[in-house]
Image (cartoon, rainbow, N blue to C red):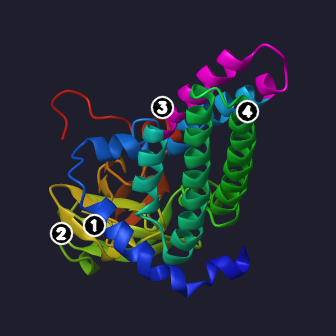
């Protein structure tokens, strides 16, 4: 798997496919496929249906008199695989280069599994039950390999994890000074530090300053290098948009809000305090920007 991560030969096809996926006219469906509404990627949830159906079909194939039931489960798995694959491709297109290499092979293994299950269903329809069973077990093997590679992508490479989740554990409780208000430019993003955590600081006026964790929750992109517009910051890496007021993720691919800080001005200096989880990143109320 380490060699696969370093396999630059995959960069060509990955770049072309990623470009195609990113230009698909999905509109708001793109955020839904990322899982912004769920708070984490939706693809791992969706794949449970085809994997569960196909594993159950394998069990039934080992039992007498279950040919029709096994075939029905294979069909359910194939139907459920399509939306799960779309969600996976949408997530994959926003990954880093090493992650995209592994993800491409993960997808290839799953596509092979889908092809084998399709052939299995066709063989069963023609009455070639033994051939259908053999193809189904081969398909389950391919999907199992794809799942193992997906596990490496998620747990070894950190694909889809909240990159800002550790901030509450790294910032000490209480107020922290981060500099003078007069030193901050109006309406522009700058980077400061609270303890060892980098933060994005945007001065709105003489008394109002917004502070968020600087590392984007999607892929740790530096928000302080992003674009400030309409009370939000856009990540320079993958375009996730966060509301400056409270870190709410307005649009993806980020699925988690950004940790935000309460601010106050004392004798011309800015002090910040990590906002309590129950008050940060809440959905906008009526009439709220």
Which secondary structure, mark 1? strand
Q: Say which element carries label 3.
A: helix
The question of residue 125 being in magenta is answered with no
Q: CA distance from mark 2 to mark 3?
A: 49 Å
Asked whether the beta carbons under mark 1 and mark 2 sit within 8 Å of each other, the answer is yes
Q: Are marks 1 and 4 in contact (CB under 8 Å)?
A: no
> Mark 1 or 4 closer to N-term?
4
Q: Give residue 137's quadrant in the image.
A: top right
Residue 259 seen: no
Q: Answer left or right for 115 relative to 281.
A: right
Residue at numbered disc 3: 79
Q: Earlier in the sequence, mark 2 or mark 3?
A: 3
Q: Earlier in the sequence, mark 4 or mark 3?
A: 4
In front of the other: 120 or 284? 120
Q: Is 130 above or below relative to 185?
A: above
Q: Position of residue 18 (x, y in %)?
A: 37, 67
Which mark's residue is nearer the viewer, 2 or 3? Answer: 3
Front in this rendered view, residue 286 or 104: 104
* Viewer-closest of 252 and 28: 28
- Magenta-drawn segment: 59-81
Residue pointed to by mark 1: 202
Q: CA distance from mark 1 to mark 2?
A: 6 Å
Determine whether, in the image, residue 157 is placed left or right of residue 286: right
Residue drawn 71% across the image and 29% down it: 129
Q: Residue furthest right?
A: 63
Q: Earlier in the sequence, mark 1 or mark 2?
A: 2
Q: Where is mark 4, residue-wise?
A: 55
Q: Which quadrant, please, contains the C terminus?
A: top left
Q: Residue 116 appears at what percent x and percent y?
A: 61, 46
Distance from disc 4 to disc 3, alpha carbons, whole Å, reads: 15 Å
Q: Which residue is mark 2?
A: 187
């Amino acid at each position: 798997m380490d060699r696969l991560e370093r396999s630059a030969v995959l960069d060509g096809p990955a770049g072309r496919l990623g470009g195609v996926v990113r230009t698909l006219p999905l509109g708001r469906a793109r955020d839904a496929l990322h899982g912004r509404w769920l708070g984490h990627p939706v693809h791992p949830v969706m794949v449970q249906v085809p994997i569960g159906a196909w594993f159950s079909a394998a069990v039934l194939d080992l039992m007498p008199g279950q040919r029709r039931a096994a075939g029905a489960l294979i069909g359910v798995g194939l139907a459920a695989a399509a939306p799960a694959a779309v969600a996976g491709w949408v997530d994959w297109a926003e990954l880093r280069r090493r992650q995209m290499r592994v993800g491409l092979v993960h997808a290839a293994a799953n596509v092979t599994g889908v092809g084998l299950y399709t052939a299995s269903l066709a063989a069963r329809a023609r009455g070639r039950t033994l051939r259908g069973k053999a193809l189904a077990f081969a398909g389950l093997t391919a999907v199992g390999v794809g799942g193992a590679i997906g596990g490496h992508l998620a747990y070894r490479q950190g694909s889809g994890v909240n990159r800002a989740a550790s901030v509450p554990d790294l910032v000490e409780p209480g107020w922290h000074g981060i500099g003078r208000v007069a030193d901050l430019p109006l309406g522009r993003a700058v980077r400061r530090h609270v303890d060892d955590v980098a933060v994005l600081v945007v001065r709105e006026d003489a008394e109002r300053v917004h502070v968020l964790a600087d590392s984007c929750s999607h892929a740790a992109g530096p928000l302080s290098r992003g674009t400030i517009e309409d009370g939000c910051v856009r990540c320079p890496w993958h375009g996730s948009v966060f509301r400056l007021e409270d870190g709410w993720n307005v649009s993806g691919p980020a699925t988690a809000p950004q940790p935000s800080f309460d601010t106050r001005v004392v004798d011309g200096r800015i002090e910040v305090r990590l906002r309590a989880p129950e008050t940060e990143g809440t959905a906008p109320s009526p009439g709220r920007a």
